[in-house]
Amino acid sequence: MNTELAKTISLYATKPHKELANFLLDKSKDELIALLNTLITTYINDKNSSLLREYIVVSLAGYKPTEQKIGYNGFKQSTDIGGKIACEAKPQNLNTADNKIRKNKKRLNGGGNFTDYTHKRFRKDKKENPNMLIAGFVDGELLYVIEFPFKTPSFLRKIKEQLKKRFPKGDKLGEFLRSAIFDFRHYKNSRNLKIIFLEKERLQKHKNNLTLNFFNFLLRKLRNETNK
């Protein structure tokens, strides 16, 4: 975080808003643009919070984001079910600076995870059947958003296998499956899979930041969309 942004945030938190307004009014247009750009860059790459990334993904997919920390990330009206349908956003952000110092570089694989998961939560999600929104960012730049129903059979099997391994006899009070993981292989054959956001130039630009199989999967999807 640079000095100007740090001072702006400090003024907002510690001084009357009029003092912050005067501070900003003294800035040139270019300085204000730079300040806003730095703020967004810092926020969208936050390793401790995916709030902004979730908001972007949910909005792009046509859902209204919720303000709640717990629960689904958004809702929209659905003519198919005659009511509201929820969405669960799972955005991943790859930080290339971190990758430079890693022995084994991370790559986006169309995956995500559920933290602190239980059989009870799994049953609830199966009943509600939210649409999953899987997204990938590289240094805050959005590459893809993929949508599919939670009740996709291969996806359900992957999550259920991990729950049964952790809790073979059912949930235990106060205990959780810390991370139920998945990747594109577990939903790629969904009949209801939709590509919400995907651009060829961005995909090619970040080819080395995706696993090869996932990159080829996205490339095929792009070609199919083009040939429609």
Image (tube, grey):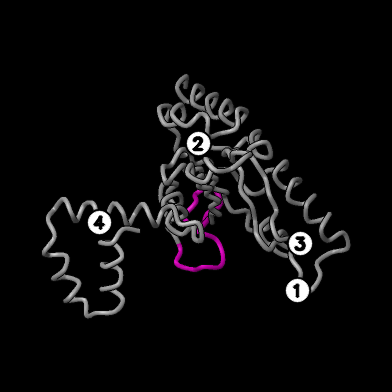
Q: Percent position (x, y) of residue 59? A: 41, 51
The overriding secondary structure of the stretch rendered in magenta is: loop
Mark toward the viewer: 1 or 3: 1
Camera sees residue 46: yes
Which residue type does callout 3 highlight?
Answer: His
Residue found 55% across the figure and 61% down from its top: 72
Q: Pick out the residue farthest to the top.
A: 227
Helix, strand or loop status at disc 3: helix
Mark toward the viewer: 2 or 1: 1
Which badge, 4 or 2, is on the more N-terminal residue? 4
Label placed on residue 35: 4
Most foreground residue, 36 or 132: 36
Q: Percent position (x, y) of residue 170? A: 84, 64
Mark toward the viewer: 4 or 2: 4
Q: Eyeballing the image, is 25 above or below 60?
A: below
- Using residue 38 as the reference point, say whether residue 200 is left or right of it: right
Residue hosting label 1: 174
Magenta region:
66-85
Most foreground residue, 218 or 194: 218
Which residue type does callout 4 highlight?
Answer: Leu
Q: Eyeballing the image, is 123 above or below 10?
A: above
The image quarter containing residue 107 is top right
Which badge, 1 or 3, is on the more N-terminal residue? 3
Which badge, 4 or 3, is on the more N-terminal residue? 4
Query: Pointer 4: residues within 10 angstroms few (<14), some, or many (20+)?
Result: some
Label placed on residue 195: 2
**How far apart, in angstroms, are the residues tagged by discs 4 and 3?**
46 Å
**How far apart, in angstroms, are the residues tagged by discs 4 and 2?**
33 Å
Residue hosting label 3: 119
